[in-house]
Image (cartoon, coloured by chain):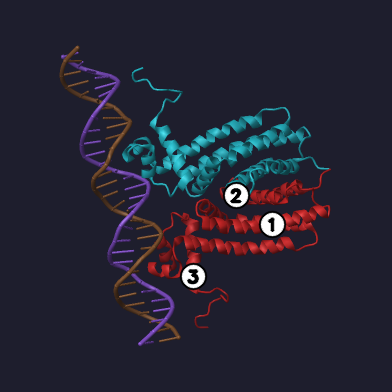
Chain colours: A cyan, B red, C purple, D brown
Amino acid sequence: MIGKKTAPSPPHPRKQLIIETAVTCFLEAGYHQTGVRDIAHRAGISLGNLYNHFSGKEAVLAEIARIEAQELEAFRTLLAAGPDPKATLKRFVEDYAEYAARPENAVLGLEILSEAIRAPQIASLFSGNRAGLVTGLAKLLEEGTRAGHFRAFEDPRETAGLILDAIEGRALRVLLKDAKGSAKTTLWRFIDAATQVKP
Amino acid sequence: MIGKKTAPSPPHPRKQLIIETAVTCFLEAGYHQTGVRDIAHRAGISLGNLYNHFSGKEAVLAEIARIEAQELEAFRTLLAAGPDPKATLKRFVEDYAEYAARPENAVLGLEILSEAIRAPQIASLFSGNRAGLVTGLAKLLEEGTRAGHFRAFEDPRETAGLILDAIEGRALRVLLKDAKGSAKTTLWRFIDAATQVKP
DNA sequence: ATATTATGAACGATCGTTCGTTCATATATC
DNA sequence: GATATATGAACGAACGATCGTTCATAATAT
């Protein structure tokens, strides 16, 4: 045991430390209210060194958005698997709602969305993330319709978008204390009814 | 016709000018990227004069949020009137979707929401606005249920929140070009199905 | 004359970024 | 093994710009 440190798959690169610190800062103060110095200081590194690892402040946010994209991958696979469309949908709704309502995801998502409106680089990242989810969810809806478990959708992609909107919007309201985090069954009843076969 | 403009009620014309200019700036560049100087300059007034009408930058945003609240009042009355709950709901969904999708409302709403997370003054304003809509919509849902036009809701307020989330979320996606502005019938079909009486 | 409205210079703070430098380690040459 | 060279992580002062805000003062209206 001389110089060897604990090393998982990515040992402990500076980049990782910077990212994690930046997330903390953005979460606490917001993107624009956080200075590059804040990140460097909280990370225990020098200001200049941060610029050795990232080309600038926006690059840090872009990297965070990229990581968020990876995390969404899990939900895409969740949507693909399963013989019972309705059960799969329910599982997805509950899991994704839980994920989206976690403060770090809700706040950061909002921060990234805000930035995406004007920064094209962030926007493409953001749209890419979501398009993947929408595609997977839309496919699930169509399969469910064919199997007779869901009603017919004139525009499955748009409907998928609406489902995600409801989940993500609720997550934000939970954050603002406008919604009780407990009312998760209401969410599923809502989406269930919205996708149910007509009488 | 000397100095009279087309404005009967607004208190101070200067205030109005500042607000309108600020809205333009916030829309173009975002709240934090807009400087107080930008607003004053674009409004054609001096920097110091702006501070004669507003106590600071945040006060300007707060005033904008207050005005947004007034605009929502129209939708509250829309929700209250009408003997046919389903027709009222449809009317509301379509009108509110059109309103929310207008860039100035969608972007400003996002900007205000972002700010609300950390600024308590803005947060209370924001929550107040929304609570009014939720209350009106929830009441409509309950009435519709009693009249047999809607299904039963275990939590009408939460359901009302989800409906608003879907509408507002879609509005944002239209802005990010992730959704076609045309697919408005899909939105209504979605909400209609979500509130319909069960088979 | 008094009160209101308007002005823009000035303030201290902070912004994101650049830069020259140090220094420990890895590689190459002898 | 010893020496020379190359590498790049780490540092923090410094830069020019801009931030929100204040204030002494001038113009205008009552």
> Total marks drawn?
3
Residue A108, position as x, y percentages in the image: 51, 43
Foreground residue, A80 or A97? A97
Asked whether the residues under marks 3 and 1 belong to the same chain, the reply is: yes
User: Dot 1 corresponds to which residue?
Assistant: B135
Answer yes or no: is residue B44 visible.
no
The answer to whether residue B160 is left or right of residue B197 is: left
User: Dot 2 corresponds to which residue?
Assistant: A177
Query: In the rendered structure, the residue with mark 1 lies on which chain?
Result: B
Q: Amino acid at mark 3?
A: Lys
Query: In the rendered structure, the residue with mark 2 lies on which chain?
Result: A
Residue in view at x 42 percent, y 70 percent = B52
Q: Amino acid at mark 1?
A: Thr
Foreground residue, B100 or A9? A9
Q: CA distance from mark 2 to mark 1?
A: 16 Å
Residue A97, position as x, y percentages in the image: 63, 39
Foreground residue, B84 or B135? B135
Query: In the rendered structure, the residue with mark 3 lies on which chain?
Result: B
What is the quadrant of the N terminus of chain A in the image?
Answer: top left
Q: In the rendered view, tell whether residue A49 sits above or below residue B48.
A: above
Residue B15, numbered circle:
3
